[in-house]
């Protein structure tokens, strides 16, 4: 069923952060999500999370402005990529979409050295 569209849904939890709401893509496509915020240049760390149906939210990648060696942990760099072009924005890409990729994707931002992560879906 190559023509089924897969919705990658993201939620907006904080008013000062914005992100794509929903992406409809075909199997095999790459899906890129943007995230931006207006919390200020101190918030230059960005996290991308995924929650698959029936599962808990998992951190896929941690990005930091000025460091292009993003931390994907156990996740594959073949499957996911991220950019952090400036302090207040970033992108996240899920490559070669499969039905199992359908889920919620969140981005979050933080300042270094602050214990708080501002979750924004
Ligand atoms: C998805 O991204 C990969 C790596 O950047 C690229 O090789 C591939 O052609 C892209 N696929 C589509 C459908 O655009
Ligand atoms: C993300 O931002 C880029 C550059 O502004 C834009 O070309 C692209 O369409 C955006 N993607 C989505 C899914 O909104």
Image (cartoon, rainbow, N blue to C red):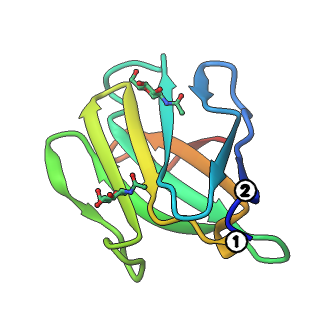
Mark closest to the chain's N terminus, 1 or 2: 2
Residue bearing the label numbered 2: 6
Residue, x 37% and y 25% (percent of image)?
88
Q: Is residue 68 above or below residue 110?
A: below
Q: Tell me how far mark 1 sits from mark 2, CA to CA.
A: 7 Å
The image shows residue 77 at horizontal and vertical percentages of 31, 71
The image shows residue 30 at horizontal and vertical percentages of 47, 54
Residue 57 sits in quarter = bottom right
**Residue in the foreground of this view, choosing between 110 and 46:** 46
Determine whether label 1 and label 2 are within 8 Å by CB.
Answer: yes
The image shows residue 114 at horizontal and vertical percentages of 42, 44
Residue, x 47% and y 40% (percent of image)?
109
Sort mark 1 into few (<14), some (14-19) or many (20+) by Cα contacts within 10 Å.
some
**Residue in the foreground of this view, choosing between 62 and 100:** 100
Q: Is residue 13 left or right of residue 36?
A: right
Q: Is residue 60 left or right of residue 49?
A: left
Residue, x 48% and y 34% (percent of image)?
34
Identify the image quadrant of the C terminus.
top right
Residue 19 sits in quarter = top right
Specify the quarter for ligand 1. bottom left
Residue, x 62% and y 32% (percent of image)?
20
Report helix, strand or loop for mark 1. helix
Residue bearing the label numbered 1: 99
The image shows residue 117 at horizontal and vertical percentages of 54, 46
Sort mark 2 into few (<14), some (14-19) or many (20+) by Cα contacts within 10 Å.
many
Report helix, strand or loop for mark 2. strand
């Amino acid at each position: 069923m190559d023509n089924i569209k897969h919705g990658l849904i993201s939620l907006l939890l904080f008013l000062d952060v914005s992100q794509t709401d929903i992406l409809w893509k075909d199997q095999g496509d790459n899906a890129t999500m943007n995230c931006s915020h207006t919390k200020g240049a101190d918030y230059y760390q960005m996290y991308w999370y995924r929650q698959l149906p029936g599962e808990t939210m998992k951190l896929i990648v941690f990005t930091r402005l000025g460091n292009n060696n993003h931390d994907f942990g156990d996740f594959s760099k073949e499957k996911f990529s991220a950019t952090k072009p400036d302090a207040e924005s970033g992108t996240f890409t899920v490559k070669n979409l499969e039905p199992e990729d359908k889920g919620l994707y969140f981005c979050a931002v933080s300042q270094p050295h602050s214990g708080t992560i501002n979750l924004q879906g």
